[in-house]
Image: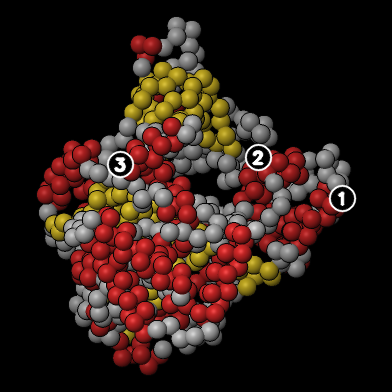
Amino acid sequence: MKKMLVIHLNLIKILFMNLFEVPQDIKTEAKKLKEMLNEHSHRYYVLDDPVITDEEYDILFNKLKKIEDTYPMIRTPDSPTQRVGSEPLKAFKTIEHPSPMLSLDNVLNEEEFIAFHNRISKGLEEDQVEYCLQEKYDGLAVELIYEKGLLTKASTRGNGVEGEDVTNNIKTIRAVPLKLLGENIPSHLAVRGEVIMLKTDFHKLNNSYEEQGKKVFANPRNAAAGSVRQLDSRITAQRNLSIFIYGIGESLPDRFNIVKSTDVFQYLKKWGFKISNSIISDDPKKITKIYKDLEKKRLFLEYDIDGLVVKVNDLNKQKVLGELSHSPRWAVAWKFKPSETEALVKKIIVQVGRTGAITPVALLNPVKLSGVTISRVTLHNPDEIERLDIRVGDTVIVQRAGDVIPKVIKIIKSMRPADSKKFSFPEKCPSCNKKIVKPEGEIIPRCVNSECPAIISENLIHFTSRAAMDIDGIGTEWIQKLAENKIIKDIADFYYLQEKDLLQFNRMGEKLASNMIKAIQSRKEVAFSRFLNALGIRYVGENTARILSKYFHSLDELIKASQEELTDIHEIGPKAGESIYNFFNDTKNKAVIEKFIKAGVKIIYSVNISGKLKGLRICVTGSLKNYTRNEIKRKIEENSGHFVDSVSKNTDFVLAGDNPGKKFEKAKKLNIKIISEEDFNSMA
């Protein structure tokens, strides 16, 4: 009773204080304490150059906290007291990234790196290219958004398009500035980095968990990722995480005069970020030596790294090289040689994917590798099985490629059982028993039976997934039953499903059936990009679907596109272009799309379909006076035109700037109209 009275009196005190202006000397002292604490945190966690002891820091911190507890109206988002965590969330929301957070393609040896360099050199038509080299941290990629210098949002990479909102958790990391330091700060800033846990902190955490009888973390990366994804940020605050910033998510305004990645780092460092170490080099041999030296040194670092990031330093040259749907063309991760271990093969099975791919999989006696338990590993295709001559009962060497994907690299034939038998790849699909075929030019055999229950099931599961139509409440088990019983034969059949179709199954009640139908019918309006991803076209994932939704202003326009028009798109390769063209020219697929329309599915198009350049395919070559490569691309797309990467007979115009390249010559040979920057401005 006495305790409750004290609490009520404190609440009354706070309410009473809110009625009056906070004394100026209190405001001044709080402001000074915040600045001092933020500066000391920056020196300790970013610069590794503390000037006060932990005890002195705690005295200042407690003094500020006491003032803010007494005068809560002066507590601000950038106050150091806001790093201690807040009440638990029920679930994470999602945040869309300003631009996709792409992953990097990997190279695993010197030959692959030289091949990457040759592609860059050819793409830029330059023999010597300056690269920026950075350690590749083994942590969790995040994006931080600052508005008017204050941290407002933080998210994980997620699927690259959108990630989980982990703002409260990121605020607990002392190396993250809650408010940017210095002057000349942009009104909007998106930075990207890698959250890590130092090895010493990882061992302390695991020792503590062992003492408490809890399950320990496999490695620092898992510990960092698990800590950032805590619904209770107070737990995250106890984990002592760190972060390295390696780049920005959007271009900085022109006033910053940014030309290279290294220019960006200089600004980020001034604003208070802990920057990834970088080295500049234009010599592939020197880069190879740096990689080898770093591989030897990695074990002695206080944090885990799994490779070297090599990226073109010049930002304009990055724009010229462009990006694929999943990764930039101008950068790679040169991964270290992965870890290895022995494992016993218990069984070899084959799986059927949603595109009909038949993939062999080895089931292993579980083994630990780089802190992760491995119990199954893909064998890729029949040629790989033949090359390895892998058999049930074999002892194999398993490697984690890029420290992530498990792979069998060798058979220890001296340990092979005497009665082992060569694995015979099945001639028929394990799901529908139809003959397996190997398409010309491909190494992966496929089931081409469009009525195969496994293919239908996998496509239906993909269709309902969060990244596609996001239909909640229909589990994998029910989808497989609907496919096996041929109640649903294609993805459009979802919208013709009735409660009576569901009620024939055991454990299916009226309420559950009703909820499933409602969940399906509630997803009749869908964004164009989601719909394209949901169709399950081979080589078309979320990013490629978004690219297609920008280039084509309606489904009808995409269906009518030629294969050449598709492959001309900068971010889409020949295989994807062919796959998309074949999909929309298949009679069965056309029928499925027609069923969607009849069922009342409405596709939402968000692009401008009446721009001045509507439908025109424009290729750009040479240096422009008033536009960067990104800006001219945006200008074309904003006016409903298509920015294409190469010159073909389908190209409408070639916009030529100073020093045009081979595209200019090809345009002349094909009699394609060449326009100047002034011509373009009059058109747009």
Name the spot of residue 451 as percent of width and height, x first.
70, 43
Q: Residue furthest bottom?
A: 682
- For the residues labelled 3 and 2, the Cα–Cα distance comes to 44 Å
Q: Is residue 473 visible?
A: yes
Name the spot of residue 329 as percent of width and height, x first.
32, 59
Q: Is residue 638 above or below residue 164?
A: below
Q: Earlier in the sequence, mark 1 or mark 3?
A: 3
Pair 1/3: label in front: 3
Quadrant of the rendering where the N terminus is positioned: bottom right
- For the residues labelled 1 and 2, the Cα–Cα distance comes to 27 Å
Q: Is residue 189 visible?
A: no
The amino acid at mark 1 is Glu
Label 2 Cα neighbours within 10 Å, binned few <14 / some 14-19 / many ≥20: many
The amino acid at mark 3 is Lys
Quadrant of the rendering where the C terminus is positioned: bottom left
Q: Is residue 598 left or right of residue 9?
A: right
Name the spot of residue 48 as percent of width and height, x first.
21, 56
Q: Is residue 28 left or right of residue 15?
A: left
Q: Which residue is mark 3?
A: 199
Q: Residue furthest front?
A: 2
SS class of the residue under badge 3? helix
Q: What is the number of the mark on residue 485?
A: none
Q: What is the number of the mark on residue 510?
A: 1
Q: State the count of labels.
A: 3
Q: Which residue is mark 2?
A: 454
Q: Is residue 514 above or below residue 301?
A: below
Q: Residue at x 52, y 35 (%)?
A: 359
Q: Earlier in the sequence, mark 3 or mark 2?
A: 3
| Frontmost residue, 671 versus 311 | 311
Q: Residue at x 30, y 67 (%)?
A: 38
SS class of the residue under badge 1? helix
Name the spot of residue 188 as percent of width and height, x first.
37, 77
